[in-house]
Image (tube, rainbow, N blue to C red):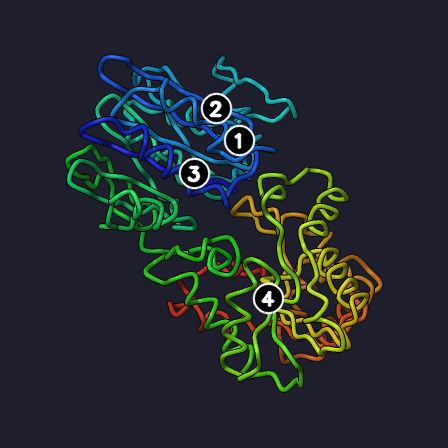
Amino acid sequence: MSGFFGVASKGSCITDLFFGTDYHSHLGTRRGGMAVYGEEAGFARSIHNIENTPFRSKFEKDLDRLEGNLGIGCISDYEGQPVLVRSHHGTYAITTVSKINNAEKLVSEIIETKAHFFEMRNGEINSTELVAALINQKENLIEGIKYALDTIDGSLSLMILTEKGIYAARDKYGRTPIVLGKKDDGVCASFESFAGVNLGYHPVYELKAGEIVVFDSDGFKPLYSPNNRMRVCTFLWVYYGYPAASYEGISVEQMRYNCGKLLARRDSVDVDIVAGVPDSGTAHAVGYANEKGIPFSRPFIKYTPTWSRSFMPTNQKVRNQVAHMKLIPVHDLIKGKRLLLIDDSIVRGTQLRETTEFLYASGAKEVHIRPACPPLLFGCKYLNFSRSNSEMELISRVVIEELEGKPATAELVKEYADPDSEKYQKMVDGICKKLNFTSLRFHRLDDMLESVGIGKDKLCTYCWDGNE
């Protein structure tokens, strides 16, 4: 995943850009970058590896080096960006939040025009560089941006820094957000709505699906009308979004309270305490506990001073070990207790199984699991969400194949999506047994959508029901 932030200021934009970008650290773990433009200094860019170091530590020295009143920044799980480009459009910097399923086809078509790309260390093409190449196929930036939005299979939101202002374009189905904020001496654009608040910006406009705008320090101007169809990623509220964020006017924290509340209304289990897997499961657990009148507690604490999210190795075995190292049990709140534990989701189930086992080892009498979303049945093909990309490793798929004795095709998997069906219950029972939970009940899709509070026709639910 990635998150970005842009600033157009009457004075220096560097401090606002630095802190606004840093506020997106929960969305990326590998690369951070900033690009700026000033009339005297021209364009400048800085990109650092942040796998083992917070964004602030790596970019602090750049505060004195960079100059400009226009800037864009990004934190990413994948490619280094912003990318600085010189083309017939002039010089510009571009940053994206994207997943390009047809990248290989698009790269081949562009290479046929005798263009070239730089390969990254893993042999892949930087997707932000590919987006720039698509934009450069057209005569002007606005046509190029629209062409890129329409051509890419997957998703794309972007910002482009030019000498005169910053272009912002939201994905054609609105899968990821862009919010504009304003204060007396400037305008900002942000993935997360809260990122500019402590810098003095107040939100003024959230781009609609497929909408393109340009802004400078005086304000913003719409350039291309939005689409009618909207498919916002529901997982932003459930897991990826920061608690202080809002999307489409719906608070992440409030949505998670609602999730817990509706989970509780369908549940009759008898437990002593309710707890959330930190951090994203906490608000769901508070909503559940408040609705049931059962004490909320923290039977384990997440250790973050040296185990920040930025340290997330690519090796899955080491990732599991890191996740285990972060959680420290509080034995007085565990021993002899019947615990109900709420996590945002179950993906492979490895980490939650290990969490459950150490709760048993610490003296827990029972461990009941209540995920805040339905079973993940399909790998996300619209966003680079590591939680649901490895489709065949999903615990739901593994159990379905064990029950069926054959590969889990998309058609077969859809038969297990109905929470009122016998097949669904067999799948849930199989997951519960395999992961050694006392009991397991998933949040229903209809209840989860009610927790968001906007129409299902505006929400993407592909990873749960396979519907596009």
State the count of labels. Answer: 4
At a point 44% along the width and 41% down the height, the residue shown is: 3
Q: Is residue 25 left or right of residue 268?
A: left
Q: Which residue is mark 1?
A: 31
184 w.r.t. 361: above or below: above
Is residue 298 shown left or right of residue 19? right
**Distance from Cα at disc 3 to Cα at disc 1:** 12 Å
Residue count near mark 2 (Cα–Cα under 10 Å), binned few <14, some 14–19, many ≥20: many
Residue at mark 1 to residue at mark 4: CA–CA distance: 29 Å
Residue type marked 3? Asp
How packed mark 4 is, by other alpha carbons closer than 10 Å (few <14, some 14-19, many 20 or more), is many
Residue denoted by label 2:
47
Q: Amino acid at mark 2?
A: Ile
Q: Nearer the viewer, residue 417 or 94?
A: 94
Q: Which residue is mark 4?
A: 276
* Image coordinates for residue 300, horizontal then vertical, percent: 66, 62
Q: Which residue is mark 3?
A: 22
Q: Mark 1 or mark 2, which has the lower sequence index?
A: 1
Q: Could you tell whether 170 is left or right of 418 in the image?
A: left
Q: Earlier in the sequence, mark 2 or mark 4?
A: 2
From the top left corner, tell me how far across and down residue 58 is, in percent: 50, 27
- Contact (Cβ within 8 Å) of mark 3 with mark 4: no
Lateral position of residue 127 relative to residue 338, left or right:
left
Q: Earlier in the sequence, mark 3 or mark 4?
A: 3
- State the separation of the CA atoms marked 3 and 4: 26 Å
Q: Amino acid at mark 4?
A: Gly
Q: Secondary structure at mark 3?
A: helix
Residue at mark 1 to residue at mark 2: CA–CA distance? 7 Å
Within 10 Å of disc 1 (Cα), the crowding (few <14, some 14-19, many 20+) is: many
Which of 424 and 290 lies nearest the eye of the viewer?
290
Q: Relative to residue 401, is residue 182 depicted above or below? A: above
